[in-house]
Image: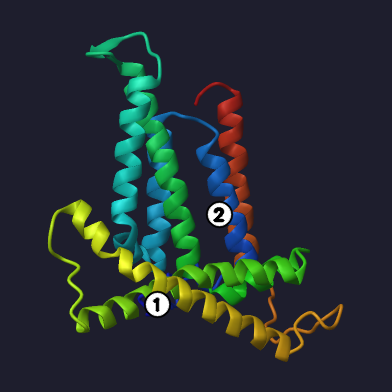
């Protein structure tokens, strides 16, 4: 597994799904978390997403974003608890309804982030681009999306390489307090920026040399085909969505 890319190669049922099916599942997940702010309901959706990640064998990637998830949860709960209005005093200026609302919003955001992480962990960039093309998105836009997904790992890899090189030359990045440590990393910004620009320029020249965009239509080596398991998963997910919407309309959620 490449340490800078999220995709984990596994032979799970979710990995074998067509990327269009995975996109639809991600979209349905986003819709589900916006149907209700009931914290128990949102927690159930979160557990369902985590179960899918466990079956796919990609929950190890949660370690990469654990700090992000912690900060999202902490900041969301604190801010919404202070600024959302309620009716039942809890302590200081915080009401019980505000805390419940804050927890619900935090679970909603965390669920969307984790669902997106699982999607990227079970879907190759090439599959994402091809799926976008097959649903009618112009290839140029699909290629931009695929390139953007590669850009962040590339910058992270470049930063690590430059950091190690600068450490070998005696640059001290670990001494001092938090502010000083941030200042210690400032000398790395210029070489990282220049290296990224250089890589982008080389990438653009490679595209031009291969005639990117020269023909209005193109052929594809990668072919996608939806099979029986894709339709079973799609109909199951859509059935769950319709059921929850009906429960919400009837007032039980």
Decide: is 182 above or below 132.
above
Observer-nearest residue: 157 or 118?
157
Tell me whether the residue at label 1 lies in contact with that at label 2, contact meaning CB atoms closer than 8 angstroms: no
Circle 2 crowding by C-alpha within 10 Å: few under 14, some 14–19, many from 20: some
Inspect this view and state whether residue 46 appears: yes
Rendered image coloring scheme? rainbow
Q: Residue at x 29, y 53 (%)?
A: 67
Quarter holding residue 77: top left
* Spot occupied by residue 143 in the image (x, y as percentages of width and height): 67, 72
Decide if residue 109 is on the left or right side of residue 236: left
Q: Quadrant of the N terminus?
A: bottom left
Q: How far from the left and from the top, in percent, is residue 160?
A: 32, 76
Residue at figure coordinates x 40%, y 20% from the top left: 84
Residue 26, given in percent of the width and then of the height, sits at 55, 54
Which of the numbered marks, if any, corresponds to residue 92? none
Position of residue 141 relative to residue 37, above or below, is below
> In percent of the image, x 21 and y 84: which residue is there?
168
Residue occupying image coordinates x 71% and y 91%: 209
> For the residue labelled by badge 2, is the local secondary structure a helix, a strand or a loop?
helix
Q: Please identify the quarter of the rendering in which residue 157 is found.
A: bottom left
Asked whether residue 226 appears in the rendered view, the answer is: no
Which residue position is annotated with label 1? 158
In this figure, which residue is indicated by the disc labeled 2?
Answer: 26
Label 1: which secondary element: helix
Is residue 222 found left or right of 2 in the rendered image?
right
For marks 1 and 2 on the same chain, the one whose residue lies earlier in the sequence: 2
x and y percentages locating residue 9 in the rendered image: 43, 78
Q: Quadrant of residue 51 in the image? A: bottom left
Is 118 on the left-hand or right-hand side of 184? right
How packed mark 1 is, by other alpha carbons closer than 10 Å (few <14, some 14-19, many 20 or more), is some
């Amino acid at each position: 597994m490449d340490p800078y890319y999220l995709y984990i190669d596994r032979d799970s049922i979710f990995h074998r799904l067509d990327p269009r099916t995975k996109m639809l599942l991600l979209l349905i997940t986003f819709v589900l978390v916006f149907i209700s702010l009931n914290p128990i309901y949102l927690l159930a959706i979160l557990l369902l997403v985590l179960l899918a990640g466990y079956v796919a064998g990609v929950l190890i990637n949660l370690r990469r974003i654990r700090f992000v998830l912690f900060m999202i949860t902490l900041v969301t709960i604190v801010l919404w608890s202070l600024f959302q209005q309620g009716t039942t005093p809890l302590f200081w200026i915080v009401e019980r309804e505000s805390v419940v609302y804050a927890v619900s919003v935090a679970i909603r955001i965390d669920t969307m982030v984790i669902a997106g992480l699982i999607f990227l962990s079970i879907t190759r960039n090439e599959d994402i681009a091809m799926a976008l093309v097959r649903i009618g998105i112009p290839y140029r836009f699909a290629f931009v999306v695929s390139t953007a997904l590669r850009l962040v790992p590339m910058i992270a890899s470049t930063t690590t390489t430059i950091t190690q090189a600068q450490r070998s030359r005696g640059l001290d990045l670990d001494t001092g307090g938090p502010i000083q440590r941030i200042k210690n990393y400032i000398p790395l910004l210029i070489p990282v920026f220049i290296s990224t620009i250089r890589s982008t320029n080389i990438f653009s020249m490679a595209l031009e040399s291969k005639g990117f965009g020269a023909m209005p239509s193109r052929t594809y080596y990668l072919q996608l085909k939806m099979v029986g398991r894709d339709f079973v998963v799609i109909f199951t997910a859509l059935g769950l969505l319709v059921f929850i919407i009906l429960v919400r309309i009837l007032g039980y959620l």
